[in-house]
Amino acid sequence: MGGFPRYCLQVPKGSCMKLKKSRVASAGVPLAALLAVLALAVPTVAAAETTESTEAVTTLEIKMEGKKMGFFGPKTVHEGEELRVVNDTMPSMVGPHTFSLVTKSSLPKTPEQRKECFTPGKICMGIAGWYGLKGEEAPKNPLVKAGKEGWDTMGTVKKKGDSYFFGKKGESFEQVVSAKAGTTLYFMCAVHAWMQGQIKVLPPATQ
Ligand SMILES: [Cu+2]
């Protein structure tokens, strides 16, 4: 388990995904575990779409789905709700992750941008900088707070955003969505630049 290693940047193109695929295949995900995940996912989605639930928690999972590793979960969350992120991958296989709010224009869009993400002046290294890191070590404090308490601030290569560093499997972190309704929060992982997503903030749920 390390810090911000350039897992997929240090190896020839393609071999990173192949490596992960074979390791995941050999590890074998029990069907029961997958079913449990599916069973959990259904009520989460349902809760996000109704206004009846109280103390709703919206959960984004960091996991493998087939060959694709990424953030999976609902596309909307209510202002004032808890947004939880859970890491279901093994750091010993795929490295750590960050869930980092970044501005839309900061997201690496092309393969070239993703490849160069962890270099000076680029967003992945910028996120490491939010943690006060210059290289690939793990941060002492996994949480970077910016703006108001909770998830609200999308950062750039120069400006801090809200971020959490996941160094362990099963690790979970949640805090309130303090971004205003109407905002779309964009996020990415600083270790795996292709792990990106967005979630739209809806008006506070009426209870
Ligand atoms: Cu990642």
Image (cartoon, grey):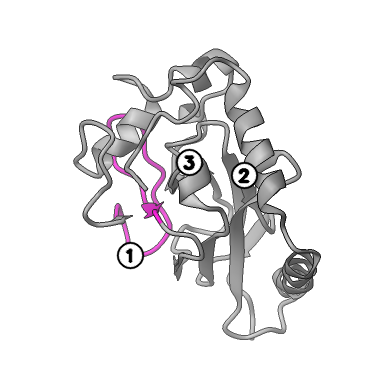
Q: Position of residue 165 (x, y in %)?
A: 37, 52
**Image side of residue 4 versus residue 193, left or right:** left
Magenta highlight on residue 178:
no
Tell me the CA gap for discs 2 and 3: 9 Å
**Residue bearing mark 2:** 70
Disc 1 vs disc 3: which is toward the camera? Answer: 3
Q: Amino acid at mark 1?
A: Glu
Q: Amino acid at mark 2?
A: Gly
Quarter-of-image position of residue 159: top left
Q: Nearer the viewer, residue 88 or 61?
A: 88
**Residue bearing mark 3:** 189
**Residue bearing mark 1:** 149
Tell me the CA gap for discs 1 and 2: 26 Å
Q: Position of residue 66 (x, y in %)?
A: 76, 44
Split into 4 quadrants, where in the image is the C terminus? bottom right
Which callout, 1 or 3, points at the residue further toward the start of the chain?
1
Which callout, 1 or 2, points at the residue further toward the start of the chain?
2
Question: Mark 3: is the Cβ under 8 angstroms from ligand 1?
Answer: yes
- Residue 80 lies, with reference to residue 61, above or below; the image says below
Quarter-of-image position of residue 201: bottom right
